[in-house]
Structures are given as C-alpha cells and as structure tokens.
Amino acid sequence: MMTNSILRRRRNELVAGVLVLIILAVLPLPIRDVYTQNLIILTILYAGLSQAWNILGGYCGQISLGHGLYFGIGAYVSTMLFVSAGIPPTIGMFAAGIVGAVAALLVGWPCFRLSGHYYAIATVVVGEIGYLLFLNWDFVGAATGLYVPFHGENWAALQFRTSKLPFHYVVLAFAALTWIVAWVIEGSRWGYSWRAVRDDVTAARSLAVRVFPSKMAAAAISGFFTAIGGAIYAQYVGYIDPDSVLASSFSVLIALPAVLGGVGTLWGPLVGAIVLIPTSELTRSYMGGAGGIDLMIYGGLIVVIALARPTGLVSLLGIRKQVGGANAAPT
C-alpha cells in the first residue's frame, strides 16, 4: 500500500496542479498584445508536448530524439482528414493520436532492441526518414505543403481569427490532460515499473518487470499525445509543410523543456517551457538575424543549467525526481 506521506504528496501535487491551471486560465484575460498571447500559447503547447515526451524519455528512460515525427504525423493526419474528408479537427486529432501511437509502436518494435545512445541515434534516423518521405510525397503536398481551409470561426474546426483566446484554452486543455496522465502514471504500478526500467534494466528483469512491453506502452502513450499536439498546432498556424512540422529541430524543442526543467519529474516540462520557449522566441524575434545570436543564447542557457543544476530547474523549487523501482511499487 502507498504510505501516508506518498498519498499526502500526491494529493498536494494535484491541488497544486489545479491552482496552476486556474492561474493559466485567467492569465491571458487582461492581455491585449497579440505577440504576448502567441508567446503564452506556444509556451503552454510545448509544456504539453514536453510532458508527452517525458512519459517515454523521463519516466521510462528512453531518450527519443525523433518525436518530431509523431508531431508531424499528427499535423498531417488531422489536416488531411479535414481537407479531404471534411472531418473536423476535434475528431481528427484523436485519429491523429491513434496514428501517432501506432507509429511510435512501429518505431519502438525494432529500436527498443537497442539501448542508450544507440536508441537515441536510431530515433534521429527514423525522424529524418519521415521528413524525407513527406518532403517527396505528392499525396500530402510534398515540399509545397498544405493550407488549412478556413470555414468560419467555430470550435469544431478549431478555427479562430478574431481572437487567440480560444486557442489558449485549447492548448491549456491539452497540456492539462498530459499533466494529469503523467500524474496518474507516476503513482501507478506502470510508473514504478517504468522507473525500474529507467534505473536498471537488469534489476528490473530480475524483479519480473516486463521491460519490452513497458517501453512499448510508454512509447504509445507518448506518441499519442505528441500527435494530438501536432494536430492542434496545424490548426493554429493554418499551414503545414515538412519543414514546419517534421524538421529535426522540433524533436529537440519537444525534449528540451523537460531536460531543462527536470527529466522524470511532474513539473519539469512546464518549468522548462516557461524558461525556454519565451527565451527562444524573444531572442529569435529581436536578434534572429544577427548571426545566430539567438541560438547562442539558447544553447548557452542549456549549458549553464546542465552544469549548475544537472537535475533541472525544478530542483530550485525543492522538487526531486521520483525514485524507486519495481521494488518500491505499491501492492
């Protein structure tokens, strides 16, 4: 059974999550500047995407650098269903999530035979293959890409032109859902098993943890939510092509908030996104044309945090990575 201290901690996390949700829900109400609204939306979106990555890369310890593939698949599946079949994105995004989960399973089936940096390199290769495939696939627009047709403002199609506020609540719902799923997993037997796999595969096997199925389950959940995030992004920007949703930079940007904030922690992706995304967007906006100064600041921030706080920014808040493998699992 879970001890009283663990139950109390998890209850406090849930209360804190509700408070953060309320704060983020009212945050944009007094803001009229469109650029600032866009910045908040992107920050929350990447917090959700990074939390999805954290399910596989943090809790299960499988460092994927190819999540941009699932992000792009989600964007293309939802958009193609909307353009070709008239299926609204509120439905299409879940179809995109299923396709993203299947893609994650197909990638995981051979790649999970690898370990450590070999697995990470394999995900990079798979992501590049996906990028080249879509770049030359005429059925999905190839390099030209796809425009999302505007059918008037409505929630079913997730199309809003006069205000960004509805999109704020769409991405907030997405980020909140990924957070609550991570919270449930963290305290479940799955979560304990996955952390055992992350910490020591040999020890996990000796304790009857099914290592390969654990990795596959984590990959499917992670791919599902990443693809949904891609579908939302496609509706937000109104246009997609391989460079805008399948570039390798997306894979890195999805993973970095969790790495910066704290891999394998519940709050790491959000804290990392709050620091990383505004820094990235502001430096690119104001110094993007000055010889890549934005990239230098971006990379320098990551190096400083890696050296000063290798456990992530959440350690400054007194939050630690959840430890304890299968031997600590609740009965």
Image: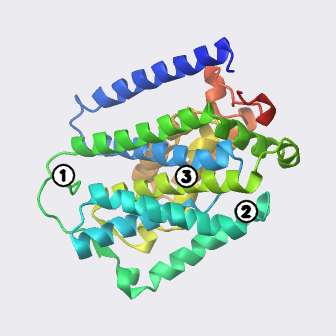
Q: Which residue is the site of mark 3?
A: 222
Q: Secondary structure at mark 1?
A: loop
210 shown above or below 7: below
Residue drawn 39% across and 47% down? 42
Residue 127 in sight: yes
Mark 3 to mark 2 CA distance (whole Å): 15 Å
278 to the left or right of 144: right
Find residue 20 and report its horizontal and vertical position in percent: 42, 25
Task: Kindly identify the amino acid type of the residue bearing the numbered disc 2.
Answer: Phe
Is tag 1's residue or tag 2's residue first in the polypeptide sequence? Answer: 2
Give me the disc on residue 112. Answer: 2
Tag 1 residue = 160
* Image-quadrant location for residue 58: top right
Camera-side residue of 43 and 212: 212
* Mark 1: few/some/many CA within 10 Å (<14, 14-19, 20+): some
Q: Could you give the CA–CA distance between mark 1 and mark 2, rounded to whole angstroms?
A: 41 Å
Left of 88 or right of it: where is 315? right
**Residue 168 falls left or right of residue 249:** left
- Inspect the image, locate mark 1, and give the three-letter code of the amino acid beneath it: Phe
Is the residue marked by circle 2 packed among few (<14), some (14-19), or many (20+) residues within 10 Å? many
| Residue occupying image coordinates x 71% and y 47% | 61
- In this rendering, position of residue 201 left or right of residue 150: right
The residue at 41%/50% (across/down) is: 286
Separation of residues labelled 3 and 1 (CA atoms): 28 Å
